[in-house]
Amino acid sequence: MIHREQLEKDDHQYLWHPFTQMQTWLQEQPLIIERAEGSYLIDADGRRYIDGVSSLWVNVHGHQRKELNQAITEQLQKVAHSTFLGLTHPAGIELAKKLAHLAPTGLTRVFFSDTGAAAVEIALKMAFQYWQQGSVQRPRKTKFLYLQNGYHGDTVGAMSVGGIESFHEKYRPLLFPTVKAPSAYCYRCYLGKTYPSCAVACLNDVERALTEHADELAAIIMEPVIQGAAGMIAFPPQYTRLIWELAKRNDVLFIADEVATGFGRTGKMFACEQEGITPDLMTVGKGLTGGYLPLAATFATEDIFRAFLGRVGDGHTLYHGHTYTGNPLACAVALANLQIFENEQTLQQLETKIHFLKEGLARFWSLKHVGDVRQAGFIVGIELVQDKTTKEPYQAGELVGHRVIMDARKRGVIIRPLSDVIVLMPPLSISLDELKALLDAVYDSIKAITEL
Ligand SMILES: *Cc1c(COP(=O)(O)O)cnc(C)c1O
């Protein structure tokens, strides 16, 4: 085995890490994860850490699951990759069938890709092209409405509908024109109101944007129930449903981006179920393979699918595909992932854990610099603030979130913050004892760093 010091040196010499200020990275000793099992990541020195954010929101049933490992090995005995362009294969067919049955009623078609951002690009292209050639042709409907603080990935199309200033503003000149609406962020309400006495007044602004631009809007895209990357901003109940109703009433397609919320994260298989809605298009990624291989999918209704039928050469085809679309190894492990949901009744088991998590979070409110604690199922955001009374944030340069997660490492926990929001997103398979250990470590780290 290559020596740890050599690996550290080579990382610093050869790599460029995602979403990373490399100048800072080069000054720190990188943590090298060599193995994992269950809820734990294990570093090159054999130290064990609870995987508190599911290896960036993807792991579902734990690391080194026998059934998942086996599904890949078995598929490997048959074929590692065969193209989906002009050919098909059993793993992809079976997975599409299973997904179509699991998805909100009405989403009947599955288009595979390999990352959440790609799944979003595909949904945008489907929505755009639908109005150009569907049974109800409305060629002026070419724009997209997105929400402030929304996140849909880092490719150019996905960024165009991205609402996180710090990620997206830099690239704005590159992006296609869109319509933006403010969104609910109850802790920092831009209207200065308080839920529920506000009666969700911010929806009026979404409605205004939708109705004013209905003639030119192909679709609205949003993360249902909770905005992830912006800092785990949970919406008030029915908020997603009310926007879905507004979109329907105004003839605007509704794209639900479930890349983060899909596969049990909010307590249901999909967050749309929490609100009893069926979107026109839905994207999934992250948890689809249980955190094993990159695979994503875009779901469409039969109505949208039919708008793309026609003769070869009449331009109705969806001109989109990736070299590794529907990779058999990824499809096989995704199938095994869904099989575990069934065999172990993962979602039923999760109810107790969600409740335990909620109770465990209660004491965080009394910490001096915890301004807000947000939870949607197994997604948690703890917002740290300089001043609890005024909600004054910390200076960005203080790196408080970063310092908390570095402290948590010493306590055997790996998490990753979103600025000064501490995120907890453990594997759904985590045990109550491990969950308690995670909560205790994070509590102690927040206290140690913010109450020096
Ligand atoms: C992570 C994420 C994406 C992007 O997925 P990638 O696989 O990183 O491209 C898109 N939408 C949402 C809601 C996400 O959380």
Image: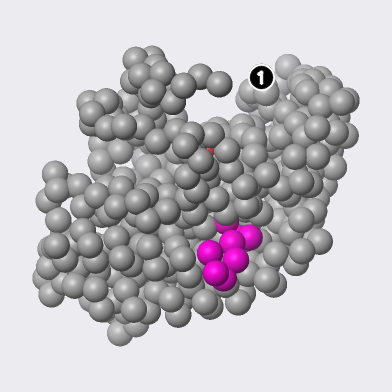
- Magenta-span inclusion, residue 290: no
Residue 2, horizontal then vertical, whole percent: 51, 19
Q: Front-most of 100 and 212?
A: 100
Residue 75, horizontal then vertical, whole percent: 83, 31
**Residue at the spot x=42%, y=67% of the render?**
439
- Quarter of the picture holding the N terminus: top right
Residue 176, horizontal then vertical, whole percent: 37, 31
| Quadrant of the image occupied by residue 18 | top left
- Quarter of the picture holding the C terminus: bottom left
Q: Which residues are magenta?
A: 427-434
Residue type for callout 1: Thr
Reading the image, the residue beneath label 1 is 323
**Residue at the spot x=77%, y=35% of the render?**
72
Outermost residue on the bottom side: it is 197
Instruction: Relative to 112, say whether 380 is above or below.
Output: below
**Residue at the spot x=81%, y=61% of the render?**
343
**Is disc 1 surrounded by few (<14), some (14 to 19) or many (20+) residues within 10 Å?**
few
